[in-house]
Image (tube, grey):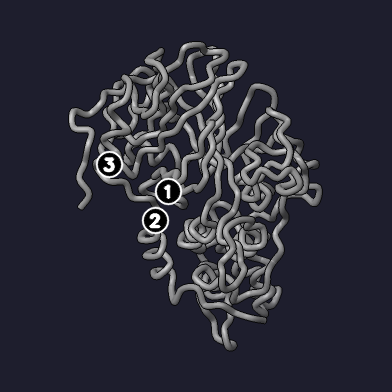
Amino acid sequence: MSVHILFKSQFDLFIYMNMRKPMKRFSAKVFSAALLASAGLFAGSASAGETRTYVVSWFHISPAVGSDKADCPQGFNPNAEENFKYWLKQMGKTPAEIEKAMDDFPNSVYADATNRGRIDGKPVNVYANPTSIPDPNIKTVKSDKALGFNLDGNEKTGGFIDVDTGEKGVDNQMFRALGCIVSERGQRHGGFESRPGYPAIQWDHNRVFTPAWLIEVSDIDDMQNDSDVGIAIVQATRPVVKDANGEPQRDITFEIDNNPRTKNITRAAIKNGVLQSTKDVDNFYMVIAKYGIIPFIGLEKAKYRFTFAEDGSLKGIVGGYQDWLDLYGGFGRGGAGVEVNISLDMPGIYYALRKMADALPDPKTGQNTRISAAYWIEAVPAFIAKPQNTAQAEK
C-alpha cells in the first residue's frame, strides 16, 4: 500500500487548517468602488429599488431530499460504538480485550483509535495520516436527487437532478460523500426541514462567539420577476442576539465588518419569486465557527439560490467548488473525540472526499483538488447599518 504522510502530528494538521485560507485579496480602491454605487453594497446597479436585509440563522451542508433507502440503500454508516469495536478487532485485540475496552467506552479507546494507523509497521496518528490504513470504503449516497447547481455546465457529469429546479447534471459530490453519515444528514420533507443534531449544537454554541453573517438583496423592482438585483453575503461586527427559542432575534440592527475578505458580492435575477445569482462569486469566504469542526467555508465559482418565505425569512442554497483537503482537515483535527461524538470514520471521510473530488486537478499528480458542494442557508429579517468608512487599506 502506498502511504503519503500528510502531517507529522495532529498539531501540524491544526496549524495547516488555521493558516491555509485561500482567499482572493482586494485592494482598498476596488473595494471602495464596489460599495459606492446605489443605496446598497453593489457596483453596476441598474436602479435603486427596494432593499431587503437579513441575518443568517443556519448554515450547513445541503439536506437530503430523498428517502433514506433511496439515498443510502445499503443503510447508514455505523455508529461510534460499532466503529470502535471493528477497529479494535482490526488491531488484533481479543474478544475479551474488546469487551473490557467497551465497558469503559469511550475513555478506554481514545489512544488506540488515534494511533491505529501504521507506517513501516509503527503506530502513527491516523487523523494526521489517514492513508496509513486501507480505504474503509464508507457508505455513500447512491440516489440521483440533491440540491445544488450544475457548476461545470455539463449535464453528463455530477449525476444529480435538483428537486426544486429540475436542473440536470447537478454537481454536489460533497453530499454524495457525506450524505450517509447520520450526524451530518439533515432532512427536508415537504415544507419542513430538520437540522442534523451535532452540527446544530455546534452552530448554536458558536452564535455567541462568532460575528453574524448578513444577507442584503438590493435594487428590487419586482419581488416576482426582476432581471437585475444585487445580492451580498457579508460579515457583521458582532454576533447575533438570541430570542426565547434560541434562534437569532429578528429585526436587530447589525453593522458590516469593514474587512473586504468577508464580503461576497454579486448580481442576481428573480424569476417566479426565486432569486438566483447571474454571476459567480470567484472566492466565496465565510467564517462559521470560532470553536468547532469546520471553522470556515471557502468556495470557488460560487452560486446562490434563495426563496422569499411568507414569514419574511429567506431560505436557499450556496454552492461551489471547495478544497476537499481543507474540508477533511476540519474533521481530522478533531481526532478521536469527533469520531466518538459524531460517529465518523475519519480516514473513510478522507478517502471518500479524495475519490469524489471533481475539479481543478493537480498538474503533477492529476488528483482533483476541489470537490463540488452545496450548503443549506436560512436567514431572518434584520437591519444593516453601513459603516462610515467603507475602505480599509491593505496591510
The Cα–Cα distance between marks 2 and 1, rounded to whole angstroms, is 8 Å
Q: Earlier in the sequence, mark 2 or mark 1?
A: 2
Identify which residue, 186 or 244, lies in the foreground.
Answer: 186
Report the label total.
3
**x then y, percent, for residue 268:** 50, 27
Disc marking residue 21:
2
Amino acid type at circle 2 is Lys
**Quarter holding residue 64:** top right
Amino acid type at circle 1 is Phe
Mark 2 neighbour class, 10 Å CA radius: few under 14, some 14 to 19, many 20 or more: some
- Left or right: where does residue 193 sit relative to residue 378? right
Q: Which residue is mark 1?
A: 296
- Left or right: where does residue 303 sit relative to residue 202? right
Mark 3 neighbour class, 10 Å CA radius: few under 14, some 14 to 19, many 20 or more: some
The Cα–Cα distance between marks 3 and 1, rounded to whole angstroms, is 15 Å
Q: Which residue is mark 3?
A: 259
